[in-house]
Structures are given as structure tokens and as C-alpha cells.
Amino acid sequence: MDGGKPDNSGGGGLPSTGSQSFFTAWEPFTIETVTVYALGDGVRTVNLCDAAGTVMATASFDLTDGMHVIALDFAVPIGVDLWPALPGKEPVPQ
């Protein structure tokens, strides 16, 4: 299954300034890979959080500037208000 935009044209995405994109998992699945667009070199960390803000899975990558396909292999359980997060940029769960 694919989800999200096919490229980085136009608006959208998960800004480094903090944001959230909540989703509901009706059955368990795995987020195998994601495409990211790094603005500058450096380590990027991606978390998968539950509705309470608890980190369920995390992965860090040392990326160069540009597009990368990164392997997350995050096991996603059934749940409501799950969300990908950037450490230090998480919103306060509602």
C-alpha cells in the first residue's frame, strides 16, 4: 500500500517546526519505507507515537541534502490518533 504525495511539489508534509498528522490503524501493518526530502546534511530522527504521546518506534538516519528512501520497518498496532513525530517538535496530545 502506498500513501502520501508522490513527490515534494506543492504544500504539505511534516514541517521541522512541529506539526502532526494523526491517523487510525484499523488493523496492524508495517510502515516499511518512507521518502524524505532533507534540507541540508545531518541526523534526522523519526518517531511513531500513540495518542498519549508515547514513542512506540524510533529510527535515526544521517542524511545528506536531497531525497532519500529510508527503511523504518515500524510495526503499527491497531489504534486511534497515532502520528509520526520529529523529536522535540511533538504537539501536546489532546
Image (cartoon, grey):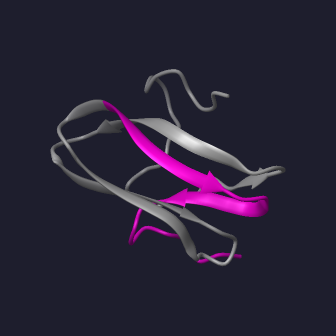
Query: Observer-nearest residue: 23 or 70?
Result: 70
Query: Observer-nearest residue: 17 or 87?
Result: 87
The residue drawn where x is 43% and y is 50% is 15
Query: Observer-nearest residue: 3 or 33?
Result: 33
In which quadrant of the rendered image does the C terminus lie?
A: bottom right
Residue 40: x percent and y percent? 18, 42
Residue 81: x percent and y percent? 73, 63
Residue 35: x percent and y percent? 43, 33
- Compared with 21, 94 (above or below) is below
Across the whole image, how many numbered discs are drawn on residues?
A: 0
* Relative side of 39 to 78, left or right: left
- Compared with 52, 32 (above or below) is above
Q: Quadrant of residue 58?
A: bottom left
Residue sitting at the far right: 26
- Compared with 36, 9 (above or below) is above
In which quadrant of the rendered image does the N terminus lie?
A: top right
* Relative side of 77 to 66, left or right: right
**What residue range appears in magenta?**
68-94
The residue drawn where x is 78% and y is 58% is 78
* Relative side of 79 to 85, left or right: right
Residue 17 visible here:
no
* Relative side of 14 to 68, left or right: right
The residue drawn where x is 75% and y is 51% is 28
The residue drawn where x is 78% and y is 62% is 79
| 15 in magenta | no
| 74 in magenta | yes
Residue 69 visible here:
yes
- Compared with 33, 62 (above or below) is below
